[in-house]
Image (cartoon, coloured by chain):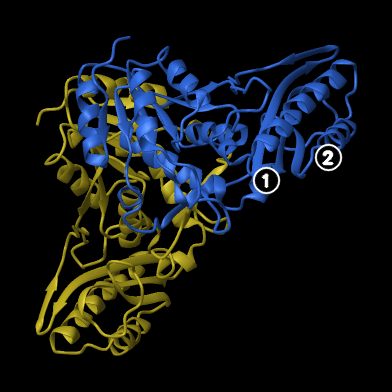
Chain colours: A yellow, B blue
Amino acid sequence: MASDKLRIACTVREAREAIAAARAANQRIGLIPTMGYLHDGHVSLIDLCKNHADYLVVSVFVNPTQFSPHEDLSRYPRDFERDRHLIEAQGAHLLFAPTTKEIYPEDSQIRYEIRVLADHLCGPKRPGHFEGVLLVVSKLFHIIQPDVAVFGQKDLQQLLIIQRMITDLNFPIQLIAGPTIREPNGLAMSSRNSYLTTGERRESATIYRALQEARQLIESGERSASIVIEALMKRISKVQGSRMDYIGIVDLARLQPVEQIQGRIAIALAVYIGQTRLIDNMILEVNHGKVQEIPAFH
Amino acid sequence: MASDKLRIACTVREAREAIAAARAANQRIGLIPTMGYLHDGHVSLIDLCKNHADYLVVSVFVNPTQFSPHEDLSRYPRDFERDRHLIEAQGAHLLFAPTTKEIYPEDSQIRYEIRVLADHLCGPKRPGHFEGVLLVVSKLFHIIQPDVAVFGQKDLQQLLIIQRMITDLNFPIQLIAGPTIREPNGLAMSSRNSYLTTGERRESATIYRALQEARQLIESGERSASIVIEALMKRISKVQGSRMDYIGIVDLARLQPVEQIQGRIAIALAVYIGQTRLIDNMILEVNHGKVQEIPAFH
């Protein structure tokens, strides 16, 4: 797919004008929402979107409503020029990079409330986070009106909550999940990895290794979630400077903790390595003796 | 505007298919959401919509999520055949009449939360009501994807909350407000008027008369909200079998109570006449000596 020169829209009006032409030409619109500081994970999502859409819109917006007051909004990494080059090189058609004022001219009086899916994992650890994600994602959906939107499976709880919003509110949008892209040492790619020191980055490799060992434990026949969680905690506690935020084994339909590992489950965790909070997960389909990893959820 | 025979869609899929053809023909889509049991107020909204859209969609759906458990969901008046004839006679193109199961195949895990605008008037009297309204209206907006949606000013707080949702969430939809249509005796038209006995209906005329007298009081120079409210309460308390639910004089931007009547304000009230809860309102623009009624808010 050849791309014309990348167009940049900083306002809602500019974005809508740019997309109107593509829509009039009956092109399928694809949206890849990001907070910028792109890495190979984002690049893979843009690439994936090409299979499902003709006109690719990448948004770059660090959304303040999904950060708690004590979180890293102000120091979240930003590099617009680098992002622009990457997005252009990927053949995207429109970069939507609004200011905070453009997205939130006033405090939103309308907010979301999430039942069930936000009860565990990151939900209680980051109060208001997913509600803020839905706020900005629904705004982006209404601004861009994509036919397809692509999100990464690394943010599994976010992915499932957005899928649920699409279903519950009848958004006419198909959600596509992209598999987690990893560093050579297994660390899940994340813009926040830039916070890590060289030593911390090396230590962080243990997170994915521990997830793989948990899978092996399940493959060997273990079905008790608490035993698998204990093994994971023990393994990760040995990482220098680490502090566990949570580990959960949950069913994939409702993200509720399970005791017996059976059917489609996710092992999901958040760990602080030094000051940096990292998340990762693995989805398994467990049917009697058969254990299968699911790299991209459908 | 000549209309082909009215099409009826009972599922989301049928509605989207019907509308896709209109959209492909570059027609402007207009939506008039109703809970059915249509009266001249609804008819006027369909009529108003013709000035703004080419393809008119009327939805008829008694939305359970906007009723509290103790409210009148089960006895809410219904007459589908009469509605269908009225909608066809008005020249609408599509009647969307889904079942409850079609709109809510499961409990919605995604809900709305409303700040500021739902703090007063009906908000505290009907907990969850406006959140349920936003749930169904946002679903209808995503199903029909109208360019224009028309709501009546009789439900003023609903109108302003929906306008705020459109603005805060960037819905690509223009909201049009239709003026309140009244019975010859001044009673605001409402499907719930069918609950009234002949005697109650006669008594109910006092509500609008009291609002007019309040306007006259303001025209004569009174600027104290509490004095105007007291006069209104006194007047309505004389209605046989009446019980005041609330009276408020609020600014139109945020629906917060004002003490001094100045600028754009609404006098809004809810009164029980027997078992039936009736609402009404009047919007005034008060600038120094000048008092002007605003029949349809923009």
Q: Is residue A171 visible?
A: yes
Query: Looking at numbered disc 2 in the image, what kind of residue is underneath it?
Result: Ser
Mark closest to the chain's N terminus, 2 or 1:
1
How far is the residue under mark 2 from the one under mark 1?
A: 25 Å
Q: Is residue A29 visible?
A: no
Name the quadrant containing residue B108.
bottom left
Coordinates of residue A65 in the picture (x, y in percent): 51, 48
Coordinates of residue B45 in the picture (x, y in percent): 48, 22
Query: Looking at numbered disc 1 in the image, what kind of residue is underneath it?
Result: Asp
Which is nearer the eye, B19 or A103?
B19
Q: Is residue A99 above or below residue B73?
A: above
Name the quadrant containing residue A243.
bottom left
Chain letter of disc 1?
B
Q: Which mark is residue B239?
A: none
Q: Identify the residue at horizontal 46%, vertical 37% (top origin).
A: B169
Q: Which mark is residue B119?
A: 1
Q: Is residue A282 above or below residue B223?
A: below
Q: Is residue A138 above or below residue B41?
A: below
Q: Find disc 2 in the rendering and name its residue.
A: B237
Q: Identify the residue at horizontal 20%, vertical 21% (top origin).
A: B24
Chain letter of disc 2?
B
The residue carrying pointer 2 sits among few (fewer than 14), some (14 to 19) or many (20 or more) residues within 10 Å by Cα, namely some
